[in-house]
Image (spheres, rainbow, N blue to C red):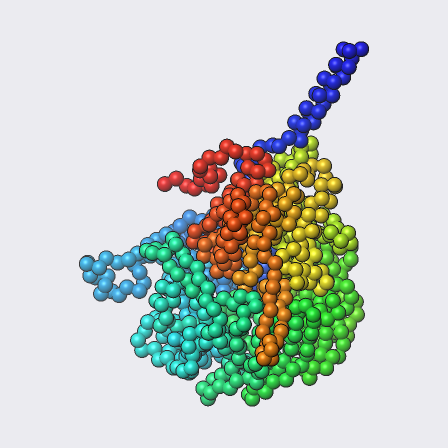
Amino acid sequence: MKNTILQFLLLLFSINFLSAQETSTHQPNYSLAAKFSPDKLAKLVHSTEVSPHWLKNGNRFWYQYKTSDGANYYLVDADKKSKIKLFDNEKMAAWLTEITKDPYDHKHLPKFDFKFVKNETAIRFRVSSTELIANSKETSDTLKDSKSPSKKENKVFYLEYVLGSNNLKIINTLKEEKKDYKKWANIAPDSSIVLFSKKHNLFWMDKENFLKAVKNEKDSTIVENQWTTDGVENYGYGSGNRGKDNVTIEKEKEDRKYVFGHWSDDSKKFVFQKTDSRKIQDLWVINSIANPRPTLETYKYHMPGEKEFYKRELIVFDIPSKSHINVDLDSTQQKSLTVYSRPFEPSSRDDDHRPTLLLSKKGKIYFSQISRDRKKMDVCVADLTTGETEILIEERMNTYIESRDPVLINNEKELIHWSERDGWGHFYRYDTKGNLINKITSGSFHSEKVTGVDIQNNLLYFTAHGVQKDLDPYYEHLYSISLNGGRPKALNPGDFTSNSFPSDNHKYFVTNYSRVNTIPKSDLRNSAGNLVLSLEEADLSQLFASGYKFPEPFKVKADDGITDIYGVLYKPFDFDEKKQYPLLEYVYPGPQTEAVNKGFSIRMDRLDRMAQLGFIVATMGNRGGHPDRSKWYHNYGYGNLRDYGLADKKYVAEQLANRFDFIDINNVGIYGHSGGGFMSTAAILVYPDFFKVAVSQAGNHDNTIYNSWWSETHHGVLEEYDQNGELYYKYAIDKNQSLASNLKGKLLLVTGDIDNNVHPGGTIRMANALIQANKRFDFMMLPGQRHGFGKMTEYAFWLRADYFSRYLLNKNDFEVDIVEINKNIPKK
């Protein structure tokens, strides 16, 4: 009996020991993560969508599509339902070899920058050869001077191919002139005059002098004409100096600069929004690694709740008379202005000259005014000649107002206006006196943007989310609907998201279908939604051969037990269902977006690649997130911008662990960038017993020093009056610093030292609060890096990988060298 009991105990111990082995912490798989670096993925995945270049004649377009066999160029005629190669790759390779004397083959052609010429019957492009010739700008006298040896440059061939022909013609061997003028020249639609800024004032030059500047900007014979004299720093007529250090600004102070504005179609009027930011306070970053010495960067930065605000005015410049008038505006109110632009025609994509035009062709300026608290918006129209202004449509909400540009239709007798006034984004039809004609779309779905209008058939084409109730509401599709209202017709339906590129007349459109767990496909369809041609299916063969596996979409509930939350689960490609894995949540709180991929993407650095280390990575939305759902969902966090999404992140993790045994709910990490950096720190401090490790990059931990647009819009700012009746703005928000004493787990803070978006001061204030609370934490400052970390993105990935591997997978044998990076650096 004793032997039997002993044998039973030994058997039980053996079973428990084996079970413990199966669920024990595993070693992180650094080699698998390194295998899917951005550089290596670029060799495995090529084109994933068709991006059409619509032509001006007929319903035709060309596009490039790259697979593991190289790039091909196609010409599609929608009317003929034909798709042919723009040229034969093997013949093109032979022609280029003969002309340039450099070897080519059909799989390794250069990337062409085409221009269609000769009524779109031919293409022209340049190809550089390895042959070195004398610099074309040097004079013959210089070349004869033995003391001045000629500089060599690669010979360039300017070539022409007539479509369907059997040869390639040399036009010339002149190198394309640098188009530096594009940095400063605002060219009128008829090219008769060019506007620019200099020393904060508006200048102009005629076409003759501009052509001189195109050839040589330093030409001393160029005649410049000064228009205004009242421009001063931070209240002038030119583009700003954002992103430039003070040394560069001083060096460029005499240079021509771009002046943005809107042109009338006849080139006789130019509308400019002048902004007075002189009383906006300065902010600074210092680039400590600049050469030869550190540089200071000073810029205007408005923070929430500050008394002063940008003062804006609209000025109409009359080109023939060189006079100007001001649009009639109430300058006593703090507000923002948006002048509405004419959408570019799809066929203008490759045009060298695309002036920004006023929405109206009939002497009107359509624009919006939105109050500083973003709760009051007026759609206005002003007379281009007199400046007289009329309010057409008023929008009022108790939270912030979202907007879209209106669309003029029916010979400018009507306009289509977008509003969330009933809790969903919808289109409304008005006459141009501001009278509502009818509501076009309605129901519990989100209309997004107008893609076209067919007046003859009384149809509106638009994109929307959530029309098909059985689909992920974030999936975007294209629809048509009667301008009188009714039921939308899906033109590219299906269980996927899509993006569409219509022709000028919207008779046809290219649509790209995608989902995180499917191979992207591209089709050509007509305005009725009927398939015209199947265009492409992405070549993912090399990616799958490398061991790649699709992630898995999921749907769970928010912390209220009612609201649906959509997310994606990423597993290691060597996933073992018998093991348990720590869970990492990659987060971004919104409210302007959510960090949840809906379509297939090779940008895997923060998701798929993190999972390969040995984690389950989940990304999901939260109440208060993406605007593509109801206004209630989008505005859920209004007034509570720090904590609104945290309960959902925790509850989603718990639901996933209940659903999947391979998730170790006792080892949960969280990470994110920017708003995600802010949120991940808040999460580990609000739920210190749940989230064990957090990596927070470039976080706006203290929103009182983040930009006012984001903070005041999404959190709210109160308009109040003091005892003297003077209006002021009251802003109060919870900060991550106030929770510093809650820290129990491991926290890594990372920031770039010249981040002029989310100032490094936010991260430094968080670090200071943790120090004051006597907490151990980790901190990394990335030298010379902006908000996105630039060239140190790969370093930041391995920094994050090390941190989670150390504290969730118990890895401690780190080398000084990051060998996974070093392996990819060529040895010299």
Position of 207 relative to 446 (above/below): below
What residue is shown at x 40% (from left), y 67% (from top)?
180
Q: Nearer the viewer, residue 195 or 154?
A: 195
Q: Looking at the image, which residue sits at the far front?
A: 723
Residue 290: quarter of image: bottom left
Q: Can residue 225 be seen from the camera position used here?
A: yes
What residue is shown at x 39% (from left), y 61% (from top)?
296
Position of 254 relative to 192 (above/below): above
Q: Nearer the viewer, residue 525 or 466?
A: 466
- Residue 289 is situated, as x and y percent measured from the top left of the image, at 38, 53
Horizontal side, residue 453 vs residue 702: left or right: right
- Residue 710 is situated, as x and y percent measured from the top left of the image, at 58, 64
Q: Can residue 88 be seen from the camera position used here?
A: no
Position of 511 relative to 570 (above/below): below
- Residue 719 is situated, as x and y percent measured from the top left of the image, at 62, 73
What residue is shown at x 67% (from left), y 63% (from top)?
638
Horizontal side, residue 46 vs residue 413: left or right: left
Horizontal side, residue 821 vs residue 151: left or right: right
Q: Quadrant of the C terminus?
A: top left
Residue 127: quarter of image: bottom left
Q: Quadrant of the N terminus?
A: top right
- Residue 10 is situated, as x and y percent measured from the top left of the image, at 72, 17
What residue is shown at x 43% (from left), y 53% (from top)?
784
